[in-house]
Amino acid sequence: MCSDPWIKIYAIIFISGLASTLILTPVFRRLAKSTGFMDVPAANHKGHKKSTPLLGGIAMFCAWIICIAAGFFTVKHDLIPIFSDVTGEHLAGLHHVSRELFLIVGGALLSVLLGLIDDKYPMSARTKFAGQFLVALIAVFGGGVRFNLFPETPGLEIPLTIFWIMLLMNSINFFDNMDGLAVGTIAIAMGFFAVIAILNSQYFAASFAILNCAVCCGFWFYNTTPATIFMGDSGSHFLGYLAAIVSAQVTFFDKGFSLSRFPVLMPLFILALPLFDTAMVVIIRTLNRKPFWIGDHNHISHRFVRMGFTRKRAVALVHLMALTIGLGILPVFWGNFATAAILVIQAVLMLGIITFLQLSLSERPDARE
């Protein structure tokens, strides 16, 4: 568990990330308008009725990288003396991972640029997948990122991590179909990852997750209904990449303290809604003999709108479901086998409800809500 100095550090990180994003987003909103980098309404699945600035991903990335650079500079030069004892204790470890962090940041930059190019000049699915694969390779072989869902089979780590990064970049891209939906869901997920990292005394992972959560919260203010700026593919790729990195950094299972094997499933449940939604829309599109990468109105948020909810309330309902699943699965981290098993079953049943909702209203026409 973290001590009082770390609580203050986490608070500073959150406020810095939030403030940076709140300040920079309007700047990039004006830049998008002046350069014509706009999302123009068309016959697609987005459903907006007016041209909207499309540089939200760049705004989030710039706020994020400024905070990381400022944090490194502050720690290296001991600019906040009251935290000297705490930061000094971990300074050597920070220098040790600086190369890996630099390459992880490089992967984040590449993911943003990939999405930005696709926003301006739409890519083929094959080209986009190739770019995502390159991003994943940089994170895995350069940044040392490993997502190990199966601790006893270390040989699966590398291919699983590459798949995980690409999966989440595409899942968040698919999930970004209503104002505030994707960024709010990732903010919630980052909050849960931060809690688990804090409980583990993983100070770097907790700080990283808190910064990501803060950036998402800052951007949500402008992206919620009615959105004044979109994150675009640059933002969805960026958030998907960050979700993959953080979920791989946090330790969910350890033989030294875990009372069951169930905690390895926690990242799947924390990110269950975008992952499950992606799986369902891919299945539906495949059954309808449509390309799975072409957007439509088969997402859970669109289903809620068809059930009579406004778009704003549909998004709020999805966020409440994300909170419910996350809070329900959190005690699995410290619970014994029986407790963890019950909570995992409860989470699976919740996903069963989502499945029912996804498959309902299938006879309704797929028209713009």
Image: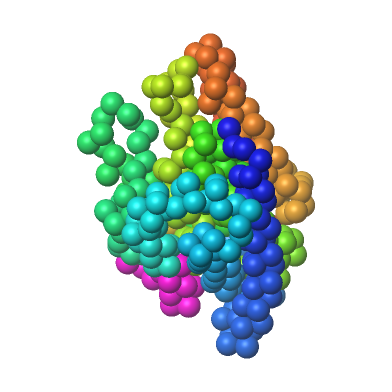
**Total number of numbered labels?**
0
Residue 68 makes an appearance in the image: no
Query: Residue at point 27% right, 44% down?
Result: 158
Colour scheme of the rendered structure:
rainbow
Percent x, y of residue 259: 47, 17
Instruction: Classify residue 157 as left or right of residue 273.
Output: left
Instruction: In the rendered view, tell whether residue 15 sits above or below residue 63.
Output: above
Query: Residue at point 57% right, 42% down?
Result: 194
Percent x, y of residue 337: 49, 13
**The C terminus lies in which quarter of the figure?**
bottom right
Instruction: In the rendered view, tell whether residue 308 sits above or below residue 30.
Output: above
Instruction: Classify residue 345 as left or right of residue 115.
Output: right
Quadrant assignment, res 159: top left
* Residue 118 shown in magenta: yes
Q: Main secondary structure of the magenta part?
A: helix
User: Which residue is nearer to you in this view: 210 or 273?
Assistant: 210
Query: Residue at point 58% right, 71% down?
Result: 59
Residue stretch rendered in magenta on the structure: 112-127
Query: Residue at point 48% right, 78% down?
Result: 120
**The N terminus lies in which quarter of the figure?**
top right
User: Which residue is nearer to you in this view: 190 or 45?
Assistant: 190
Quadrant assignment, res 161: top left
